[in-house]
Amino acid sequence: EVQLVESGGGLVQAGGSLRLSCAASGFTFEDHTIGWFRQAPGKEREGVACIDNDIGSTYYADSVSGRFTISNDNANMTVYLQMNSLKPEDTAVYYCAAGVVGYYQCTGYDREYIYWGQGTPVTVSS
């Protein structure tokens, strides 16, 4: 069966760092783009960062560019999100998702992604 399992979320102070992991199984990893999305209560879901697992190209939302880094390990079918210089406004549930889309189809394209994980919560205190 298709699975995407996020881990690594937690509580952190502003300015701190977290590394999220997304372990995938049950589909052809290299044929899909993997995206990280987040949703806070009362706000719409937004794309954070996306990576093409075949060519390695990446896309970042303006709000996280320069602070977050997305990377992949195709041999282990895992995508990571390194989050540095965290801000309270980064607080949300973070989801990973897979889609047959381009890496640039990230922010505003969440409805194009087919498979979704259960989410991992990130809370940044001030």
Image: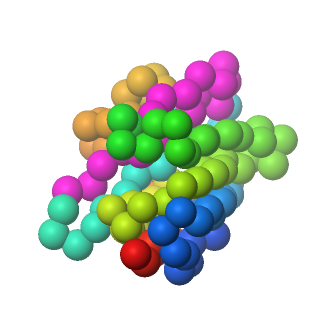
Instruction: Residue 90 in the image: state x and y as whole percent.
Output: 39, 61
Do we see residue 117 in this rendering?
A: no
Q: Residue furthest right?
A: 75
Give the side of residue 33 with respect to residue 93, left or right.
right
Which residue does the image show at 45% across and 72% down from the upper left?
Answer: 124
Q: Nearer the viewer, residue 36 or 31?
A: 36
Which residue does the image show at 43% across and 77% down from the upper left?
Answer: 125
Give the side of residue 75 with respect to residue 72, left or right.
right
Instruction: Residue 116 in the image: state x and y as whole percent.
Output: 45, 56
Quadrant housing the N terminus: bottom right
Q: Residue furthest left?
A: 42
Q: Nearer the viewer, residue 67 or 82?
A: 67
Give the side of residue 121 with respect to residue 111, left or right.
right
Instruction: Residue 74 in the image: state x and y as whole percent.
Output: 77, 38
Residue 45 falls inside the magenta stretch: yes
Q: Nearer the viewer, residue 31 or 68?
A: 68
Residue 122 sits above or below residue 70 on the image: below
How is this picture coloured? rainbow
Residue 70 sits above or below residue 5 on the image: above
How many numbered marks appear?
0
Quadrant housing the C terminus: bottom left
> Which contiguous range is marked in magenta?
44-60
Residue 56 falls inside the magenta stretch: yes
Instruction: Residue 73 in the image: state x and y as whole percent.
Output: 77, 42
Do we see residue 56 in this rendering?
A: yes
Which residue does the image show at 52% across and 37% down from the upper left?
Answer: 66
Which residue does the image show at 58% across and 54% down from the upper left?
Answer: 84
Give the side of residue 47 with respect to residue 77, left or right.
left
Q: Quadrant of residue 31?
A: top right
